[in-house]
Image (tube, rainbow, N blue to C red):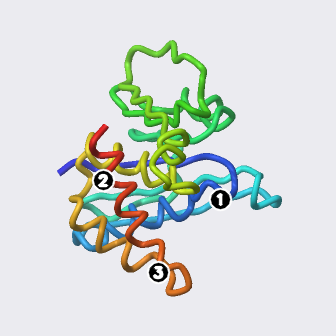
Amino acid sequence: MTDYNMLLAGFGGQGILFCGKVVAYAGLLDNREVSWLPSYGPEMRGGTANCSVCISEEPVGSPLVTEPNVLLALNGPSFDKFIDSVVPGGQVFIDSTLVERECSRDDITLFRLPASQLSLDEHLEGIANMIVLGKLLKETGFSTLETVEKALEKCVPPSKRHLLEHNIRAVKLGMSK
């Protein structure tokens, strides 16, 4: 199996840390070695947010991802900040509704998905992160849909349990694109 050194980035309120937590929990459910390291600016909602997620067959040496082989960027500043750190051969997933910039790199695979617009069109407001996660799942195969659904069941807090089906629907929508 492939080792994943993922960097998920955006601004506070986009669900970046939650998205990373779901990815990490899926890795745990798959009996892999996992680390999840959140990082966010002092502003929280509206400030910067990113998290490093490592999924491996071997113990993870450092939870900090500085050279990701997978980048998920949900806004332009995050794309600008991290695109050059992606290793050659890496995969980059962006919300093309919010990241309009072109990428000059030809040594990575770039997936553009208008997740924010899709979330509005499909009445899934506020969960564009899960749409991009679905595309990431489809293209990387870091886990299975069944496992990600179980991870969502664990990660969605009881107070937001009513949103579980919407999150699962958003992941499936991303996988269909």
Q: Quadrant of residue 40?
A: bottom right
Q: Amino acid at mark 1?
A: Ser
Q: Earlier in the sequence, mark 3 or mark 1?
A: 1
* Mark 3 vs mark 1: in front: 3
- Callout 1: SS: strand
Q: Which mark identifies residue 7?
A: none
Query: Can you give x and y, in whole percent of width and height, for residue 50 in the image?
Result: 60, 52
Instruction: Name the residue type under label 2.
Output: Lys
Q: Circle 3: is it few (<14), some (14-19), or many (20+) Cα within 10 Å?
A: few
User: In the rendered view, does 167 fall on the left or right side of 55?
Assistant: right
Q: Nearer the observer, disc 2 or disc 1?
A: 2
Label 2 to label 1: alpha-carbon separation: 27 Å
Q: Is residue 31 above or below residue 168?
A: below
Residues at discs 2 and 1 in contact (Cβ within 8 Å): no
Q: Which mark is residue 161?
A: 3
State which tag comes first along the sequence, 2 or 1.
1
Nearest to the observer: residue 36 or residue 147? 147
Q: Residue under circle 2? A: 172
Q: Earlier in the sequence, mark 3 or mark 2?
A: 3
- Residue found farthest to the bottom: 158
Given the current orientation, which residue lies at the most extreme right position?
Answer: 43
- Residue 13, image x and y in percent? 67, 58
Report which residue position mark 1 lands on. 39
Task: Identify the residue at image location x=53%, y=79%.
Answer: 160
Q: Position of residue 52 (x, y in %)?
A: 51, 55
How many discs mark residues in the rendered view? 3
